Amino acid sequence: MADGCACDRHAQTYLSVEDALTRGLAAADPIMETEILPLGEATGRVLAENCISRVEMPAFDNSAMDGYAVRLSDLGDGPLFELSIAGRVAAGDSGAHTAPAGSALRILTGAPVPADFDAVLMQEDCEATPDRIRFTRRPKPGQHIRRAGEDLRAGTPILRRGCEIGPREAAALASAGYGQVTVYRKLKVTIFSTGSELKQPGEDLGPGQIYNSNRYMLRALLDKPWIQLTDAGPVDDDPVILEQVLSQACDSSDLIVTTGGVSVGDEDHMPRLFAKIGGETDVMKVAMKPGKPIMFGRRGDALYIGLPGNPVSAYVTWQIIGSQLMMRRAGLRRVPPAPQQAILAEPLQRRAGRQEYRPVQVDGIAPDGRPRLRLMAPSYSGRVALLAQADGLAVIPAETASLPEGHALDFLRF
Ligand SMILES: Nc1nc2c(c(=O)[nH]1)N[C@H]1C(S)=C(S)[C@@H](COP(=O)(O)OP(=O)(O)OC[C@H]3O[C@@H](n4cnc5c(N)ncnc54)[C@H](O)[C@@H]3O)O[C@H]1N2
Ligand code: MOO
């Protein structure tokens, strides 16, 4: 900052995070191909049809309690009521039971309530012998009966296309009668990390070498039932090999994600190579910190996202931009990051210009319930160990240069 300016001089020429995201989403067309899977094999996949209930839920009037089904018309004035027990209905029975006037039926939870019976008594409220019950409180009409269709009428929408089939969705689909469902085919994603300095964890490091952390971070981020992942491994900063790997990945994938080589150094080949193989770049630089050099674009049907090499930058750009494009491409209804409100536990000073996602730790809770945030090191884009110790990211607006202790900020908790 030789000129004494507290702002990032180049930031005006970069795209805002919001504009970059808008451009990216426009380039991330959802895949169209679908497949039909048995419900039991669809767990974790992306639903590709709007689903309605095919049955009434519940399908028939049934008892919510273990007890006795009665007809209110059989009851006298009280205060003591007494009925004989004329039979027994269990879950799975047809419910075509009849009983002479003045009698009750033993009934179990989930059993169909036979015609004309209009209340169920919990067994705890009755004095019962093997063939008679006595009770003192007159049941209300419909008591402890779950009515056919009261949960959901047949034909009512239950799930919309674009949701991930998790445990709750699987249960809803099963109870609505779906033995099989239409899901989007898996998204074909290829990843590779660029850099001649990269060694695999477990190997010995030579001079100038570092362990490849981005590869394992991406593998963990992309470990999803709706992704078919190809890990093309680490690739040296050799333009000939990089071009070949990138081109092959574009031919065979819906989405390619790389790390490194997107900045302006002599060995930062990705933007040039992507253009050389016929790619059209949508975004080159974004006014965000970390992660200013992030690029994405398309070649044919393939969407390419080039994340910066610095591990924290790669993680943040993935969370804020990359993952959003991927969700859309996979047919998923997007879940944008949802910040919560937090306050600063200490004052903040920084260079304005880029929207910043600063790793923070939660340091107590303010009296109003908002977490108090302690800022981690101001220069952190390469400090991957710090990311594992952070509780989340504080979002600092682009134009902000300083904030006092106690100031409110958006907080993206991990
Ligand atoms: N003159 C300029 N230089 C740089 C700029 C700039 O605007 N002008 N931007 C800086 C910023 S900000 C970032 S972020 C980096 C991004 O650069 P690249 O995406 O080209 O990444 P590399 O140069 O390949 O690597 C950066 C850094 O990260 C390490 N790295 C790379 N891959 C991995 C990996 N898989 N696992 C762990 N660490 C990795 C690499 O060794 C470098 O230290 O550019 C700045 N420069
Ligand atoms: O954007 Mo770089 O990611 O600031 O280190």
Image (cartoon, grey):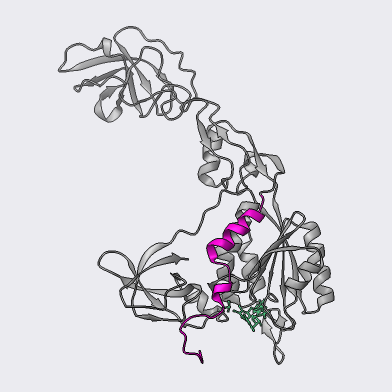
Occupied quadrant, residue 234? bottom right
Segment tinted magenta in the rendering: 1-29
Q: Is residue 380 positioned above or below 15 on the image?
A: below
Q: Is residue 92 a member of the stretch shown in magenta? A: no
Q: Is residue 264 positioned above or below 174 on the image?
A: below
Q: Is residue 360 positioned above or below 176 on the image?
A: below
Front residue of 349/42: it is 349
Residue drawn at point x = 57 percent, y = 60 percent: 21
Q: Position of residue 141 (x, y in %)?
A: 28, 19
Q: Is residue 225 visible?
A: no
Q: Is residue 92 positioned above or below 257 on the image?
A: above
Q: Is residue 23 a member of the stretch shown in magenta? A: yes
Q: Position of residue 128 (x, y in %)?
A: 27, 23
Q: Is residue 274 visible?
A: yes
Left or right: 172 in relation to 61: right
Q: Position of residue 173 (x, y in %)?
A: 55, 36
